[in-house]
Amino acid sequence: MVYEKPFEALHWDLIHHEPSLAKTRYFSHSVDPVTKYQMGEDISDKKQTPASLLGHISFVKTQFGLDIRTIHSDNETALVSTISSEAQARGINFETAPSHQPEQNGYAERYGALITSMARQLTEDAGLPHSLWHEASRAAIYIQNRIPHHALDWKSPSEVLASHLGEKAPHWLQLKPDLSNLRVYGCKAFVRTHNIPRLAKLAPRAEIGYLVGYEASNIWRIWIPAKNRIIRARDVEFDETKFYKGEEEHSPIKLYDDSSQLISTIDDYTSSCIFDDIDIPDPSQTAQGGGMGQIDQPVPVPDENHTVPDEIHTAEDLVDQPVPVPEETQPDQDLILGDLPLSPPLEPEAECVSEPQSEVDDLFPTSPVLGKRSRSPSPSPEDEKRPRINLTAFYQAFSSNQIMPKKHMVSSIPPPPGDFSQVKSHPFRREFLQAMDVEFNKLVQMGTFEPIPSSRIRESHVRDCGDLNQKHCIKHQVLPLKWAYDYKSDEKGFVTRFKARLCVRGDLQVPDFQDARTSTLAARTFRTLIAIITTFDLDTFQMDAVNAFLNSRLDNEVYCQYPAGIGSNGKHLRLRRALYGLRIAGKRWETDIRTMLISLGFKPCPEDPCLYSDDKMIIMLFVDDFLAAYHPSESEHAFHIRDLLEQRYEMKRSGELTQFIGIRITRDRETRRTWISQGAYIEKIATKFNLLDRRTPHTPLPSDLSQVTRPAETPPDPTLVHLYQQKCGSTLFPATWTRPDTTFANQVLARSLTRCTDAHLKAVDHLISYLHGTKDLAICFDGRKQTVAFTAASDASFADNPDRKSSEGFIFSLFGGPVEWRARKQRTITTSTTEAELLALSHAARQYYWMKATLQTVDLLVSENSSFQTKLRHVDIHQLWILQEVQAKRLQIQWIDTNNMPADGLTKALTRPKHDAFIRQLGMEQIPFSPDV
């Protein structure tokens, strides 16, 4: 029978359990088939069953003012004999299922199993004993009554019941359920202790317990293991990261003194003969010397007067230096331990033989950045008079149990220096100074610039420009140089090396008439190639052109100042090669590599000049990063091309496809699946804006956009605008490359870049928190799926903006994964939903032809029958381009309902259930492989 009103019927069941902490063995459970609202309580004996059910009937009558007409139950013997007469007296129809036919009481059985399953999951996840099943079952009902149900059109039972009751609803039953009291079930709770004796000043002020139930907005049920009882408490502090670990957690803490290993290792310690004046000296070496000297020498930082030697040595061994632990700020004075208690000196087992000075100089040549290395000064006579102490014991004591991190996450260390002045105080100053040394030496070796006297520039300026005070003479403008610092990381975000790059301040260069425009790899091309590689199981390799721009020579005069940290001696630098930052540097490199690839038989893609192909392989470029894909049978040809490129340019091989321009690529060739994600970048921006500890939202934006669709009426604070623009710009990278689920949110927030409010700032923080909580959500390309190779979906939301313009979006999928998407506001106002849908469809169709041409370039043909999915049911159109394409059978249009429309999430903010469905429609999923840490 189908019921229309709440509690016209009540389905009841009795669930059997093991004895609980409260000595109960049964759970009396009932559910309303209309609102799905549930009630339940634990009882100790079957004789209490009739009273329990009658209590449910009275609760519905008293709280909701509703009369139950029918009760459905199984054939419970303890209930039938007693309740039948009582129900008949109240005018209630009491129906029972046949014996041994529980499926006849389907509602109660199904929802009872749901509560039992949820209670089991709650206790298992929290590590709570099974004797607390009665509390977990109550908590499960409390939660189920407040969360959305698919059968209720994603509304909660409490919301549906409150909407039916209207003004008759009790005060505690709200139309929008209050979830502010929900905490992680089973988490540790500190319950305030009351009635402490006045003189017990040191008595504990709180009891340790664990959350097992919810009663009201500020009342919780707490289990106290020490007393093995459950209390109701209001004054509670929760630690939602800790849970019950058994009785040993509440036992006294045991202390262990494991000094045997430390003592034994001191006797076995052998002093090292390798020392470095910049690092902490070896303790055994110090014990042999007369005095302490310096525990740590500060790193010598070059000043502006540091001169460049005539001959600059290389430092090849420093290019891929391992990542050390950051150095702490060093004390200004030497550390003196003369007043410490002395231990008998230990004789070293081996005598350290110092190396000749010439050999040390050969190992560490003179550096234009670090300067000439020198030994620590000899101890002074005052230091010689101090008692000698052996530091081996101290060193061993501090280092024996110290765990030194082998890797650093980029998100967990300070940001790189902004300029040279910040290097001096940076924790990784030594590493960045060494990277500067490597960079400058490399540039000198390649003949990037040559020193010239400043007077020669002045003479040429007067000769060619006439006026010495003329500042905008293009030919003789002297540009400053700038150091740019960065961390190089792997696909998981761990630092691999430190990078210092010398750049020209091209932004200060006087504009000329040379074409400086360069091509940039389209994100859609990258995703398309990944989809092709996955589906056809292609082999890949990556390469990085070292100092790519420097392969291009300059034919015009460009002068620069000496970089910070390098003394000029009254000279300037004339550039001979296209240094990074120069306006035409990118264009020169693009022309050079394009000429090279064409000479090797490759053809550039007209739709994307960064994509090249021949009959046997595909090469994709992103500035100086190369990605090649080829069939395993063409390996010989691919390796030949790689060798030719390495003969022309200095290349660094990166091996198989695991990371490209900061995007992590996880590939499972056995199952032909590939995931692309940007977890490391998202972690970086969440750390930058201090948003790591926020609770993860379930959607990129709240479903109510009224606060963020209207810009500020008055000009906002410039500081607020700058911060908002930084955050919006940071979220644009993942929205463009790997996170189509945030595209609509990003374009909505970008509409108010100069007229933002506090609500906009809160919304972009919401978006970043969502990204961080779902940082392992990835686009998945699945070569096993038996689906249409290429599909396109277009959607529009009519007049949904304050200016009455419509929002539109489209998404293209190739081999199961999205390769192209767009969300934007239409530029014109449409008069109907049909017109808005048609305009969106025409925009998507034009982009489809670009995609088709790109695929044909790599010999991957798309069928003429490729279908467009749209919500456009019927259109009365004449003399329109889209009609022409349909009639020519170049496009095929198919209608699709809203619930199955993949582009729906690109036109509006979705609720959580619909957003979850949108994620599945996009073909996105969590990366199944846990990152190595």
Image (cartoon, grey):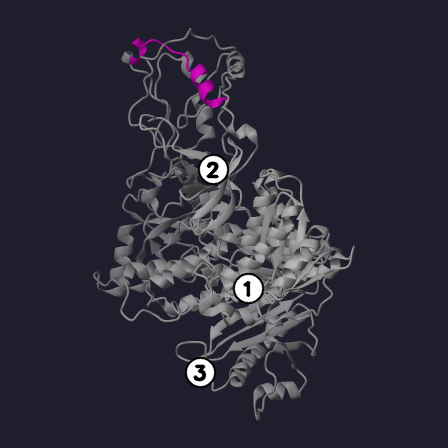
Discs 3/2, front: 3
What residue sits right under mark 2 in the picture? 315
Left or right relative to 757: residue 239:
right
The one nearer the camera, 358 or 495, is: 495
Instruction: Give whichever of discs 1 and 3 has the lower sequence position.
Output: 3
Residue 915 shows which numbered tag?
1
Residue 927 visible in the snapshot: no
Q: Position of residue 820 (x, y in %)?
A: 57, 68
Rounded to the nearest angstrom, the CA distance separating label 1 from label 3 is: 28 Å
Q: Residues within 10 Å of mark 3 (few under 14, many from 20)?
A: few
In the rendered image, the residue lying farthest to the bottom is 878
User: What secondary structure do most residues of the magenta stretch adopt?
Assistant: helix
Could you tell me residue 739's position as x and y percent? Answer: 53, 61
Q: Secondary structure at mark 1?
A: helix
x 55%, y 64%: residue: 915
Q: Nearer the viewer, residue 901 or 58?
A: 58
Residue 669 is situated, as x and y percent measured from the top left of the image, at 70, 53
Q: Amino acid at mark 2?
A: Ala
In the picture, which quadrant includes the N terminus? bottom right
Are there few (<14), some (14-19), or many (20+) residues within 10 Å of tag 2? some
> SS for tag 3?
loop
Q: Which residues are magenta?
A: 383-400
Asked whether the beta carbons under mark 1 and mark 3 sit within 8 Å of each other, the answer is no
Q: Which residue is mark 3?
A: 828
Above or below, 23 relative to 864: above
Q: CA distance from mark 1 to mark 2?
A: 54 Å
